[in-house]
Amino acid sequence: MQRILSHHLPGQVGATVRIAGWVHRRRLLKSVAFLIVRDAAGLAQVVLTEAAVRSAVAALPEETVIEVVGTVVANPTAPAGVELTDPAVRPLGPPAVPPPFDLYRPALTATLPTQLDHAPVALRHPIRAAALRVSAAAVAGFRAALDARDFVEIHTPKVVASSTESGANVFALDWFGRPAYLAQSPQFYKQLMVGVFERVYEVGPVFRAEPHDTVRHLAQYTSLDAELGFVADHRDVMAVLRDTLAGMLDAVWSRAGTALSTLGVEGPEVPAEIPAVHFTEALTIAGAPADEPDLAPAHERALGQWARAEHGSEFLFVTGYPMAKRPFYTQPDPARPAYSNGFDLLFRGVELVTGGQRLHRHDDYVAALAARGEPFEPYAGYVEAFRHGMPPHGGFAIGLERFVARLIGAANVREVTAFPRDLHRLTP
């Protein structure tokens, strides 16, 4: 008999079926017992009336893996409106050792460090699993949105010979006796691949060695990167980003609707045109000094509140960041060279995306590195490509975990990361 998942049971009323999963909860009453079985699709209720079956199930701890063969009967009070009766229950392994928290409760009561220490079982909880389903749907939407716009998915090295962001901390390693680094981003490679496919994207891990210990930073996270050629300026990149975000949210609603219901989330709409303010105006709105070189988290929160109040938008572009705070490959604003053709996208008052227009002429790269006192040699292989003709181009990068955390209202990005890596955690 073919196994079916719990969400298919409503269409099987009157049939004898086989399900399998984990013992999620047992309720042992005097004359009847209820067994809740959890599988990848949800929960199924099994009614136990035969004494021998009740006795056998009573000896199975939560999280024991079992299969059940029974008859599907309608019951509006049961999960999905059906339950299994006259069951035969068979363990598929030894009795499980119960985890250090109850997975059947509506919310995990264990502290986040305890959950992370026991991530393989904590992630089985419907709330934790739902967040990962949202993450998977968002990635599917990212790919679909860019595939529909003739982007090509690429895969770039995660071990590199030089750091991408000049002056930033990197994870160094020994590469057969030579110094190397874990890639901070696919930035250089995705730019070079614009010279091949014009429009490219990548989904992959990036590594940041900054010693942040906050609720919004990880030392390894998943970056959703895109780069496109033949742009007029950064506004073309912003338009593609807007459509990409809309596609991601559409995919989350269509592919992870049950997960959103589990989490009690109602998502935002992406405006047809996301409001945008120049960095200098953003400082005024946030009440920051006019000579502030960057936006602090408090400034971002103030801007998020302003965007909701003035535009009814959960999203806000801040454009024209000072060149001093942008990487050397950033295109300056021709009208105001101290400012960049770069942008950040704030989502609910937190920076979500960084992007902009890049330099595309070889001589401009040579001059930009010299102006910052950067040695040319570590970047020689990258800069060489620009001698052979590269179009005006730009791109962006979305931090997946931060996006999901803001979307579902998680207080900490580690709540939406299966096995986070940060300043303190290398296991499990």
Image (cartoon, rainbow, N blue to C red):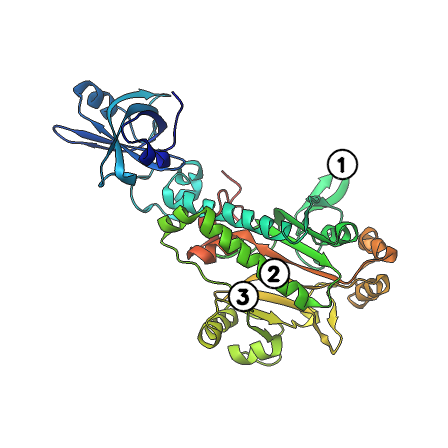
Would you say the residues marked 3 and 1 are in contact, meaning their CB atoms lie under 8 Å apart? no
Q: CA distance from mark 2 to mark 1?
A: 39 Å
For this rendering, which residue is in front, 342 or 40? 40
Q: Secondary structure at mark 1?
A: loop
Residue 260 x %, y % = 40, 51
Q: Which residue is mark 2?
A: 241
Residue 286 x %, y % = 52, 77
Q: Give the mark nearest the N terminus, 2 or 3.
A: 2
Q: Give the mark nearest the N terminus, 3 or 1.
A: 1
- The quadrant the N terminus occupies is top left
Q: Which residue is mark 3?
A: 346
Residue 200 in view here:
yes
> Which residue is found at the position 62% from the left and 49% from the top?
207
The amino acid on which the numbered mark 1 sits, given as a three-letter code, is Phe
Quadrant location of residue 36?
top left
Residue 423 x %, y % = 54, 50
